[in-house]
Image (tube, helix red, strand yellow):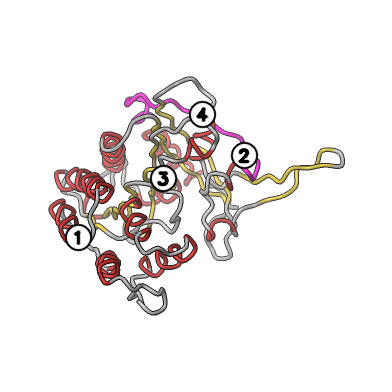
Amino acid sequence: MNDIDPLEMVNFRRVEEIFLSLVRSHEYQEIRTPTIEPLHLYTATRVLSPQLLHRIYSFLDWDGWSGERVVMRPDSTVPAARLFSESEHKISRLCYVQPVYRFSTDEQPRELWQCGVELFGVSAVHADVELLSLLLELLEKVGIKKDRYHIDVSHAGLVQVILSNTGMSLEDQRRLYEVVLRGEKVSKEEFSIHDDAVYSSIDLLSQIKGKSSEYALNLQSLLKNSNSDIERSVIELESVSKILSDAAVNFNILPGTTANFDYYTGVTFRVVIQDTECVSGGRYDLLTESLGAEKSPASGFAVDLMKLAQLSNFGG
């Protein structure tokens, strides 16, 4: 975990102030959640992918002879969802500026300062469009010009529908998804895929890479065994692609933008500025239900505040 020196703090505060001013103008309310949370809060919600599970700071919080395993907050979305689930509101726009803690064996910081937003109770396509529009406005206000970044978008629900058609176990679906993310050829023999139509869909999925909203619509006609879930996924993907096209933003449509196969349910996205990923987010409609509350539409994004502060150009 690193110090933030006085010069770095200047840009840190400028990004923070721009972010909070912007999201407040869109009726987002600021929250702050505990640094330490019970481990079961995260395992129940499936937010901890196998990759992230090995990077959490976890220990026993002793109480006499008994104790509970707790974690230093590795993510801000789950605590925000817990807070929403405990409220009586049907729609909540929440924002935060706070650190998360993740173990790293390389030079990456283990304390990551995030500024982010979570939108509960507003379903796709409206919420996805709202979040991406907000994100584009933030990038503009901190001086990130469009020729310096691109946005990768995908649809987790589309991937899940296609892989569920394979009849594989959930564990094998996760393994296959990792192959697709790495851009490798999917082996019919390795995964025992006997249905040619299903394999054709998976093979197409692994080759997805488009740069227009029209490309998203073409996916529906190319995918085999299309159903209402695939149609809905393509419509949602096309809607966010159109927002990016209309804004003249460079973007890619990919098979996936996140390694977490189970957690996301809809459109996902990430912002890459000069080869540095600074923003990630997406839709996770099952989150509140996994916390034992009523199911609610939910989506959001988190910004690596320090990376954005380092890359920002306030004079430009």
Check if residue 255 falls in the magenta segment: no
Q: How far is the residue under mark 2 from the one under mark 4?
A: 19 Å
Q: With 198 as the anchor, is 168 left or right in this view?
A: right
Which stretch is magenta? 20-40
Mark 4 packing: few (<14 Cα in 10 Å), some, or many (20+)? many
Mark 1 packing: few (<14 Cα in 10 Å), some, or many (20+)? some
- First along the sequence among labels 2 and 3: 2
Q: How far is the residue under mark 3 from the one under mark 1?
A: 25 Å
Q: Tag 1's secondary structure?
A: loop
- The percent coordinates of residue 222 (x first, y second) are 17, 61
Query: For residue 178, which quarter of the picture?
Result: bottom left
**Residue at (39%, 70%) from the top-left corner?**
179
- First along the sequence among labels 1 and 4: 4
- First along the sequence among labels 3 and 1: 1
Q: How far is the residue under mark 2 from the one under mark 1?
A: 40 Å
Amino acid, disc 2: Thr
What residue is disc 4 on? 85
**Whether residue 297 is situated above or below residue 40 in the rendered picture:** above
Please identify, in this view, whether the residue under mark 2 or under mark 1 is nearer the observer. 1
- First along the sequence among labels 2 and 1: 2
- The percent coordinates of residue 251 (x first, y second) are 23, 55
- The percent coordinates of residue 102 (x first, y second) are 57, 53
Q: Which label number is shown at residue 35?
A: 2
User: Can you say which quadrant of the picture contains the C terminus?
Assistant: top left
